Image (cartoon, helix red, strand yellow):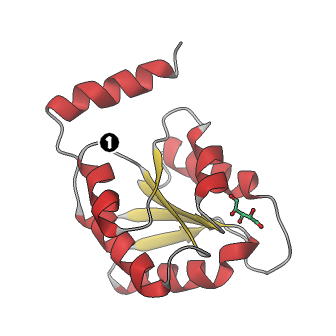
Amino acid sequence: MKIAIGNDHAAVEMKNHIKAYLEAKGYTVVNYGTDTGDSVDYPIYGKRVADAIVSGECELGVLICGTGIGISMAANKVKGIRAAVCSEPYSAALTRRHNNANIIAFGARVVGIGEAEAIVDAFFGAEFEGGRHQARVDMLMDIEKQ
Ligand code: RB5
């Protein structure tokens, strides 16, 4: 699976760690984030990862900023994106299984390295269940057309 990863200046170290962690598990990870601690604007990176998914270049994404909130808000402005901010693995698994989330987001200033690993393990280890959840995801995506 090809995963897009993006981050702002608050999450360079976390991005590098999670990228290497996922690569060690056999995933291909494409870096769309910043690589220095110089202050940048998180909407740029949220959109880059969202565009990579909507275009089909990558299947799923990881977004990390200080809280995970701003960068996921940016991604969720792009049609076709369902980005979920999660601070623990239970929600990360459920947002794949029920919401068919295509981006997992979290905050480098909120969760530690171990929790971040557990979050991505839960997200990429889960699959969308379809069924009654498909109708709800369809309703969610209909809102984009209104
Ligand atoms: C950057 O200081 C910070 O605002 C950003 O990383 C993020 O937390 C925004 O939601």
Q: In the picture provided, is 59 more to the left or to the right than 54?
A: left
Q: Amino acid at mark 1?
A: Asn
Of all residues shown, which one is farthest toward the left?
131
- Residue 135 at x, y percent in the picture: 24, 25
- Give the camera-side residue of 52 and 127: 127
Image height of 29 relative to 105, above or below: below
- Give the camera-side residue of 22 and 92: 92
Image height of 113 relative to 27, above or below: below
Judge whether residue 22 can be spotted in this image: no
Q: In the picture provided, is 34 more to the left or to the right than 30?
A: right
Residue underneath mark 1: 99
Judge whether residue 46 can be spotted in this image: yes
- Give the camera-side residue of 124 and 11: 11
The residue at 35%/22% (across/down) is: 139
Please tell me whether mark 1 sits on a helix, a strand or a loop.
loop
Q: Quadrant of ligand 1?
A: bottom right
Q: In the picture provided, is 121 more to the left or to the right than 8?
A: left
Q: Quadrant of the N terminus?
A: bottom left
- Residue 125 at x, y percent in the picture: 24, 66
Image height of 30 relative to 114, above or below: above
Ligand 1 within 8 angstroms of badge 1 C-beta: no
The residue at 22%/54% (across/down) is: 127
Image height of 127 relative to 4, above or below: above
The residue at 34%/77% (across/down) is: 118
The residue at 57%/48% (across/down) is: 50
Of all residues shown, which one is farthest toward the top?
146
- Residue 75 at x, y percent in the picture: 60, 46
Tell me if mark 1 has few (under 14), some (14-19) or many (20+) residues whose alpha carbon lies within 10 angstroms of its own: many
